[in-house]
Image (cartoon, rainbow, N blue to C red):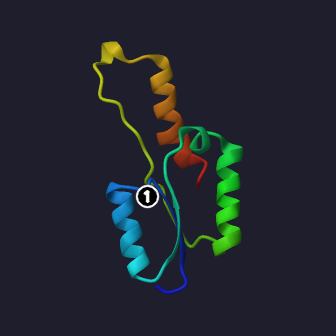
Amino acid sequence: MLNKVTLITGASQGIGRAIALRLAKDGFYIALLDMNPDKISDVSKRNNIFLQSEKNLGCFDVIINNAGIMQVNALSDVVPEEVDCIFKINVEGTLWEI
């Protein structure tokens, strides 16, 4: 798979990191992104990151939407701001990358 370009979100640890290491070993060019809630949930900032990555690496052949967060709280302790943050990263972050 030489010369293929991929974008991986949530790439600093866990599954995202493992995918990045494997694809690098297989010869992919990789743009690695990890969570910054301000950037991943802001469409214009996220688009700027993607455009800069494409400028440096070329058009993406593969996009791996791996970024996501979760909170472990009792339902009675969940506040609307927490739900908004989770939704922006897990749903909107993935939606706007497509």
Residue at image position (38%, 71%) is 21
Most extreme residue toward the top is 76
Q: Residue at x 71, y 45 (%)?
A: 44
Compared across the picture, whether 8 is left or right of 78 comes to right
Q: Which residue is mark 1?
A: 11
Q: Is residue 61 above or below residue 49?
A: below
**Quadrant of residue 59 in the image?**
bottom right
Compared with 58, 16 (above or below) is above
**Residue 46 percent coordinates (x, y):** 64, 49
Q: Residue at x 56, y 47 (%)?
A: 95
Secondary element under disc 1, as helix, strand or loop, is loop
Mark 1 burial class by Cα count in 10 Å: few <14, some 14-19, many 20+: many
Residue 48 at x, y = what percent?
71, 54
Q: In this rendering, is residue 58 above or below 68?
A: below
Looking at the image, residue 69 sits to the left or right of residue 72; the answer is: right
**Image coordinates for residue 77, horizontal then vertical, percent:** 34, 14
Q: Looking at this view, is 46 or 75 the one in front? A: 46
Against 3, residue 9 (above or below) is above
Q: Position of residue 40 (x, y in %)?
A: 57, 44
Q: Amino acid at mark 1?
A: Ala
Q: What is the quadrant of the C terminus in the image?
A: bottom right
Q: What residue is at 56 percent from the left and 73 percent from the top?
A: 61
Q: How many marks?
A: 1
Query: For this view, does 67 lie left or right of residue 18?
Result: right
